[in-house]
Image (cartoon, grey):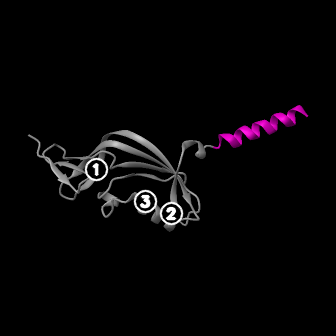
Amino acid sequence: MNKKIEKFGVGNLYPDRNPPEFHFFRSECIEVDMSDGDGFTFTPFFNEFKDTNDLDNYLEKYIEDKKLEKLDVRMEHLKWCSYYINPETLELEDFIEGVCNYVSYWVWNNETKKLDEVDTNSLNDDDDEDEDEYEEEEEEDE
């Protein structure tokens, strides 16, 4: 029988499994990809996020520390996910598995100093590419 321990209100620790596992509850973990090439998995109360469960504040501090004026952020909210964990240190180790629940897109608003949610179309440069192609076709016709 596997002993289950709820920890931090964000998931369950299974210390009797070999190796021990931590299973996050629904939508607690978020895969974050940023337009500056950086990215991470937000795991509230664990590893680099051991003191927080507030992703917005973490990202605002990240932007402030890097002195960024523009940043696009893609967040993949995981329905659930599991990690191996060191039960003594409570450090998450290797990712086991997870399933995506939904994806959201955000843009840093340098005036309000907040992230604004946007739809996927506003992050595409397709319109600019279409305009460039149209201008090239006009030049060829002349």
Find out whether the residues at labels 1 and 3 contact each other: C-beta distance under 8 Å.
no
Region of the chain picked out in magenta, as a range? 125-142
- Residue placed at 66% from the left, 40% from the top? 126
From the image, give the main secondary structure of the stretch colored magenta: helix
Residue with the mark numbered 2? 63
Check contact, mark 2 vs mark 1: CB within 8 A: no
The residue carrying mark 3 is 56
Asked if residue 81 is positioned above or below residue 108 in the image, the reply reads: above
User: Is 133 within the magenta?
Assistant: yes
Q: Earlier in the sequence, mark 2 or mark 3?
A: 3
Residue 103 screen position, x and y as percent: 45, 43
Q: Name the residue under label 1.
A: 93
Q: How far apart are marks 2 and 1 (CA)?
A: 27 Å
Amino acid beneath label 1: Glu
Location of the C terminus by quadrant is: top right
Q: Position of residue 1 (x, y in %)?
A: 8, 40
Counting every numbered tag in the picture gives 3
